[in-house]
Image (spheres, rainbow, N blue to C red):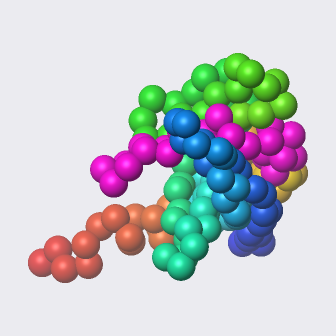
Amino acid sequence: MRNDHVTLRSTAVFDLLAPRAPAVPVKVELRYDTRDPYAVVAAFRTGRAGWVEWVYARDLLADGLLAEAGDGDVRIRPSVEDPESVMIELNSPSGHAVFEASAQELADFLDRTYDVVLPGNEHLWIDMDDALTHLIPNDLG
């Protein structure tokens, strides 16, 4: 396990799309932390309510830049209308949202994560003892 942890942050503006309404720009902070090297966090600014965070696989972001990816709550795909954009679809029990984002901004962020942790080397950043401590209850007896 590596101990020289890094957190990368990048801000972007995604367009929230809705039928028969103009796109609404939403500030988004993208984060990558080597303490969770398989994941990317997208924090969406929601006005007075603060931030809503979505955590998804870094591989899903990479795959979604090239082709339709994801079959769960997060789906990412290149835009059909604009090759410079990516569509990000989020589903939860409380709602559904579709965002359009710059493919180049997402690719640049992804490249920065690869500069820190190469794909396939994520396991080198995991502290298995710490992970097991969080999974196994302390009061087994």
x 60%, y 62%: residue = 44
Q: Is residue 112 above or below residue 73?
A: below
> In the current view of this chain or complex, which residue is farthest to the front?
20
Q: Is residue 41 left or right of residue 73?
A: right
Q: Is residue 104 above or below residue 45?
A: above
x, y percentage for residue 75? 54, 34
State the residue in front, 28 or 31.
Answer: 28
x, y percentage for residue 24? 65, 53
Q: Is residue 111 visible?
A: no
Q: Is residue 10 above or below residue 21?
A: below
Q: Is residue 91 left or right of residue 139?
A: right
x, y percentage for residue 4? 77, 72
Q: Is residue 47 left or right of residue 118?
A: left
Q: Is residue 87 above or below residue 53?
A: above
How many numbered discs sit on the rendered protein?
A: 0
x 45%, y 29%: residue = 71
> In the current view of this chain or complex, which residue is farthest to the left?
141
x 17%, y 74%: residue = 140
Q: Does 95 appear in magenta?
A: yes
What is the quadrant of the C terminus in the image? Answer: bottom left
Question: Residue 78 appears in which quarter of the rendering?
Answer: top right
Q: Is residue 20 visible?
A: yes
State the residue in front, 39 or 87.
Answer: 87
x 25%, y 72%: residue = 137
Q: Does 16 appear in magenta?
A: no
x, y percentage for residue 121? 71, 46
What is the quadrant of the N terminus in the image? Answer: bottom right
State the residue in front, 103 or 135.
Answer: 103
Question: Residue 12 appears in which quarter of the rendering?
Answer: bottom right
Magenta range is 87-111
